Image: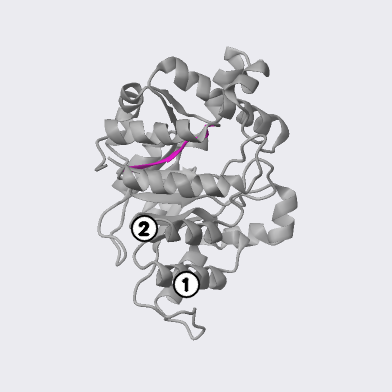
Amino acid sequence: MRLSVLDLCSVIDGEEPRKSFEYARDLAQAVESFGYTRYWVAEHHDSLGIVSSCPEVLIGHLAGHTQKMRIGSGGVMLPNHSTYHIAEIFRTLEALYPNRIDLGLGRAPGSGGRAIQALRPDHHEQAQRFPEEIDKLFLYFEDKLTLKAAPSINTKPEVWILGSSDFGARLAAQKGLPYSFAQHFSGRNAIEVMRFYKENFNPSPYLEKPNLIMGCHIICAESEEEADFLSLSSDVSMAYFIQKGQSMPLLKPEDAQQVGLTEEDRFYIRQSFPKFVGTPEKIKEELAPYSQYADELVISCMVYDQKKRINSYRLLSEVFKQNC
């Protein structure tokens, strides 16, 4: 199974937010050496704990510091933006880094109400037009409209549909596009959604057979105890999000431990935001039921310590036998 990265660019408690961009660069270079397929950056707004508000800027930065790995958005929230301008941005990135750019598209706002109003007061209406705007995007990429999206180039980004419900699966299957399902924050049964996409896929000029990624949150370490300890940081962050609707910087596990989450609290949090925590062998076993549907995993790893975070991705690459 192919492995990839989904980075929310979490802020680390006690550090400047811009340090997160350095960590993203270093992680991208590390996972490229581990044999990972792609590195995606998510779009989020109005957040103290996440600084991936402009994925298109980070994509250019990360592509410039890697050699061959695909770099892209996981995803751009299309209703927040002008479809025409997104076509221009990603054509520019594709011109700079040919055959390396992914454009993952979602229809959610990636933010709360204040940011939605600031970004796009008519977001709801734009979200309703999401399927038509995807068609328009391809027309821009193929120079089939009078209005041209510069620069005009012979290649185009690889377009993915992202989703956490069956809406995205239906849309991707209907249009014959690759699909990424967000298992890590979806309440839907991942296997049912992924099976639906694969069984209902319509071949298209863009894709002959289904191509499916499952997004998941994984924290991997040499021992169960260490992995569980490292996961305390994200557990507290997710608890804060559930209570306040806002993200917070990742705490040291020692500090997160002092918050006093009970085992019941942690169970509830992981029902809302599922994650796989443990040794490489345990995680591979737990992922086995999904592997008959997912062609690839795009993995988020919210860990305070950058070295431990990189090690988590390294351990996964070894157990899944990537070409390191």
Q: Residues within 10 Å of mark 2 (few under 14, many from 20)?
A: many
> Which range is magenta?
296-303
When asked about the image quadrant of residue 153, the answer is: bottom left
Circles 2 and 1: CB distance less than 8 Å? no
Indicate whether 202 appears above or below 191. below
Which of 35/29 is in front? 29
Which amino acid, mark 1? Thr
Q: Is residue 188 visible?
A: no
Q: In which quadrant of the rendered image does the N terminus lie?
A: top left
Query: At x 47% / y 67%, what residue is drawn?
Result: 90
Q: Is residue 243 visible?
A: yes
Give the image location of residue 192, x and y in percent.
38, 36
Residue named by callout 1 = 92
Q: In which quadrant of the rendered image does the C terminus lie?
A: top left
- Return the residue found at the far bottom: 146
Residue 199 lies left or right of residue 85; in this view the side is left
Secondary structure mostly seen in magenta is strand
Which of 257/120 is in front? 257
Give the image location of residue 247, x and y in percent.
66, 38
Which amino acid, mark 2? Leu
* Disc 1 element: helix
Question: Which sits earlier in the primary sequence, circle 2 or circle 1?
Answer: 1
When asked about the image quadrant of residue 171, the answer is: bottom left
Indicate whether 58 appears above or below 190. below
- Judged by depth in the image, the label closer to the viewer, 2 or 1, is 1
Which of 170/309 is in front? 309
Q: CA distance from mark 2 to mark 1?
A: 22 Å
Give the image location of residue 28, x and y in percent.
43, 48
